[in-house]
Amino acid sequence: MKKQFIFILLLILPVFFTNCEDEENEKYFPPEKISELSLNNIESFWENDTINNISDYVTENFNADSCHLVSLRYSSKAQKVIAVSVFKSRESAINAMEERRRNVACLFENGTSDEIEGTWWFANCLPPGVFVNKLNTIIEVSYYNKEIEEVKNIVYPTANEIAERVDELSIVTK
């Protein structure tokens, strides 16, 4: 009886420690490929602008998350921002974004249109922008000092382009 209990416990116990483990996704974006996204090479977004800051910092909420692996953030003189954060799994990326939504003063709303594929949110505050989940990443594209309606024709296609790049650079895990 004791051996059966230990056997069952050994089968069940790993379930409680898998919240940051890689999911059994077909695709996974490797964090070491983040620079290959070439975030500085999106002509339609950076047109008539100059990138003036590149950093690995995105937000305290993501950096404090134990499932966060790496982030890369580009910002410009015209106050445009592109950031990508990589997590251990799709689930942990979405959880981190939901935690961010709960902990900031900005109102993040669920994206409901098909202008951006998959799970996404938009912020109609400072800065207005979109946040897209693609596999195990969160993609942020924003433009300070504008209203969301003014910039969605810039930020939506840029977010879609980065999501495509994430998908192309991802690896099959099964």
Image: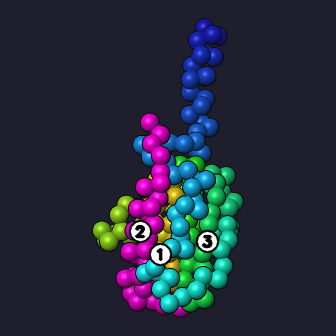
Residue type (three-letter) at the residue carrying disc 1: Ile
**Which residue corresponds to mark 1?**
42
The mark that comes first in sequence, 1 or 2, is 1
* Residue at 47 percent of width and 40 percent of height: 173
Q: Amino acid at mark 2?
A: Glu
Label total for image = 3
* Residue at screen point 61% across, 29% down: 13
Q: Bounds of the magenta span?
A: 145-174
Q: Is residue 39 above or below residue 134?
A: below
From the image, state whether disc 1 or disc 2 is nearer to you: 1
Magenta stretch contains residue 25: no
In the image, farthest residue toward the top: 1
Horizontally, residue 6 falls left or right of residue 166, namely right
Residue 116 badge = none
Dot placed on the residue nearer the N-terminal end, 3 or 2? 3
Q: Nearer the viewer, residue 174 or 24?
A: 174
- Secondary element under disc 3, as helix, strand or loop, is strand
Q: Please name the residue that numbered disc 2 is placed on.
A: 161
Q: Which mark is residue 73?
A: 3
Query: In 3D space, how far apart are the residues under numbered discs 3 and 1 (Cα atoms)?
Result: 14 Å
Disc 3 residue type?
A: Arg
Label 2, secondary structure: give it. helix
Circle 3 Cα neighbour tier, 10 Å, few/some/many (<14 / 14–19 / ≥20): many
Q: Is residue 112 visible?
A: yes
State whether the magenta stretch is mostly helix, strand or loop: helix
> Residue visible at 43% across and 55% down?
168
Point out the frontmost of discs 3 and 1: 1
